[in-house]
Image (spheres, grey):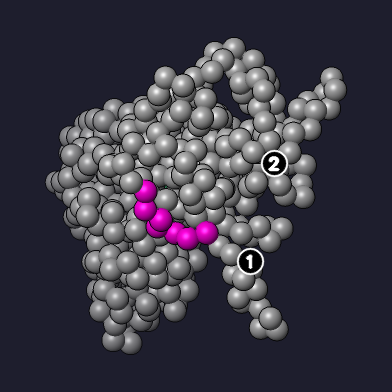
């Protein structure tokens, strides 16, 4: 029966006496009216505040992982907040450069970067390339021999650490498509190749154990393994490690019952672990610690607004409340079994006696936004319904499945709303068709 847990809303959220929710002073239901639904709404100050917490904990060593949510406005915000940017494809790189993001502050990731993508990155002067495979090393060496400037490289390492998260987003285990194995000696061999090859510039090592990670001890174990590698690099390759990049991965609270470490707790844990491991290993290198948060910067700042279109009560089975979006704007439930809370922005403080399932509008039974959601009684067609904590990996994984147009994105700040990505129109659905 209990009311919606408003602590899942972004920092600037307020709820008035009648239960209407506003973000940064802007009424959510009125945003739905003005911009239409589905709509991604971001609390801009909330994103900036998280950037600042990371900045104060890691100084210059923070790169925002753009795969979590990227558009021109977001890239500019990240730059204004003094963070670097992680891109994982030529497409993310394109958007970053189109936003005017300084190339030297970009880290380029990806397990299958093409020669064309690498060429673009080197020509643009991208600051760091996280090299993922031997064939990529070869491609880079060839480009440099052909006259492009030698990039600073990080060797991406698979540290063999379990992150205790969904297997699709667990990336640090040995059986992974990412990086060079640590235990197998491949990572050290890749570093040796860079150091002795004299073609590329060795800058450091990188690992990313997974995403939506709640357990700090998983990061601590990754630190131990990576510092072991730092020592091996000193002893066996005779090189100092300037940068130790621990990737991203800090989890966030999606549900009332979730407990996630804070950014500060995460920062303290990894700093202490690195300090201790370096001292224990007796290494000379004092690498700068880098981190690449995505989800923990944007997820809690975002809310998706939908309009309820159909309510179907199957006596004794289930009530489906269908909204005007679904797996095209949030692929996470169907992909990872991700769970979300939901609320009605016009009456968020009401008791919630009804248990219903929020379904999308796509032609799949699995297109469920929230299974067994709690809602107030008397939910009606036409009401606006919201899912909180949808700021990460929703817009960025959105599709046109069933030719549903992708939603607009709005940033709210200081009482006003600004459209940062326009809604697709039906004509966008045929804009690439050669025969249209
Ligand atoms: N750095 C690297 C190299 C990564 O691969 C990732 C995420 C990050 C940083 C950022 O991780 P975060 O701080 O956001 O956890 N689509 C999935 C998440 C995939 C994450 C992929 N890599 C989801 O919706 O849960």
**196 or 263: nearer the eye?**
263
Badge 1: few (under 14), some or many (20 or more) residues near its Cα, within 10 Å?
few
Q: Would residue 401 be visible to someone looking at this image?
A: yes
Q: Looking at the image, which residue sits at the far bottom?
A: 146
Q: In which quadrant will I find the N terminus?
A: top right
Measuring from the top left, give residue 280's x and y in whole percent: 21, 33
* 307 left or right, relative to 293: right
Measuring from the top left, give residue 136's x and y in whole percent: 43, 70
Q: Badge 2 is on which residue?
A: 309
Residue at (18% x, 39% y) in the render: 56
Residue at (25% x, 57% y) in the render: 79
Q: In which quadrant will I find the C terminus?
A: bottom right
Q: Looking at the image, which residue sits at the far right?
A: 315
Q: Would residue 234 be visible to someone looking at this image?
A: no
Q: Badge 1 is on which residue?
A: 426
State the SS at label 1.
helix
The image quadrant of residue 168 is top right
**94 or 270: nearer the eye?**
94
**82 or 144: nearer the eye?**
82
Measuring from the top left, give residue 388's x and y in whole percent: 49, 34
Residue 266 drawn above or below residue 69: above
Residue 84 drawn above or below residue 45: below
State the SS at label 2.
strand
**Majority secondary structure in the magenta region:** strand
The residue segment tinted magenta is 417-423
Residue at (62% x, 71% y) in the render: 427
Does the residue at mark 2 contact the one at mark 1 (Cβ under 8 Å)? no
């Amino acid at each position: 029966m209990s009311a919606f847990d408003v602590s899942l809303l972004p920092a600037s959220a307020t709820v008035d006496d009648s239960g209407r929710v506003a973000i940064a002073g802007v009424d959510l239901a009125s945003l739905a009216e003005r911009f239409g639904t589905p709509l991604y709404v971001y609390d801009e100050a909330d994103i900036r505040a998280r950037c600042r917490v990371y900045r104060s904990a890691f100084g210059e060593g923070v790169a925002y992982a753009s795969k979590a949510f990227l558009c021109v406005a977001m890239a500019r915000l990240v730059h204004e907040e003094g963070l670097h940017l992680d891109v994982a494809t030529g497409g993310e790189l394109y958007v970053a450069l189109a936003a005017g993001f300084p190339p030297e502050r970009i880290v380029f990731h990806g397990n299958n970067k093409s020669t064309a993508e690498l060429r673009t990155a080197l020509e643009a002067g991208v600051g760091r390339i996280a090299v993922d495979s031997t064939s990529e090393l070869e491609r880079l060496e060839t480009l440099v021999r052909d006259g492009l400037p030698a990039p600073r490289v990080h060797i991406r390492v698979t540290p063999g650490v379990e992150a205790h998260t969904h297997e699709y987003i667990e990336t640090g285990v040995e059986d992974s498509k990412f990086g060079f194995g640590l235990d197998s000696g491949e990572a050290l061999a890749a570093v040796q190749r860079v150091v002795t090859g004299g073609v590329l510039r060795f800058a450091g090592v990188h690992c990313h154990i997974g995403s939506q990670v709640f357990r700090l001890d998983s990061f601590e174990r990754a630190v131990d393994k990576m510092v072991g590698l730092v020592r091996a690099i000193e002893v066996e390759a005779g090189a100092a490690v300037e940068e130790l990049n621990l990737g991203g991965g800090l989890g966030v609270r999606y549900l009332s019952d979730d407990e996630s470490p804070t950014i500060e707790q995460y920062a303290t844990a990894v700093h202490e672990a690195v300090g201790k491991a370096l001292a224990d290993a007796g290494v000379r290198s004092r690498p700068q610690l880098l981190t690449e948060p995505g989800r923990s910067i944007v997820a809690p700042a975002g809310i998706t607004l939908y309009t309820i279109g159909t309510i179907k009560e199957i006596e004794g089975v289930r009530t489906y409340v269908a909204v005007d979006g679904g797996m095209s704007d949030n692929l996470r439930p169907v992909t990872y079994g991700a769970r979300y809370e939901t609320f009605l922005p016009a009456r968020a403080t009401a008791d919630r006696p009804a248990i219903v399932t929020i379904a999308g509008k796509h032609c799949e039974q699995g297109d469920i936004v929230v299974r067994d959601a709690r809602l107030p009684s008397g939910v009606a067609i036409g009401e606006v319904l919201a899912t909180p904590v949808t700021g990460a990996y929703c817009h960025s994984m959105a599709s046109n499945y069933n030719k549903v147009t992708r939603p607009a994105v709005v940033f709210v700040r200081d009482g006003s709303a600004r459209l940062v990505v326009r809604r697709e129109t039906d004509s966008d659905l045929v804009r690439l068709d050669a025969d249209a």
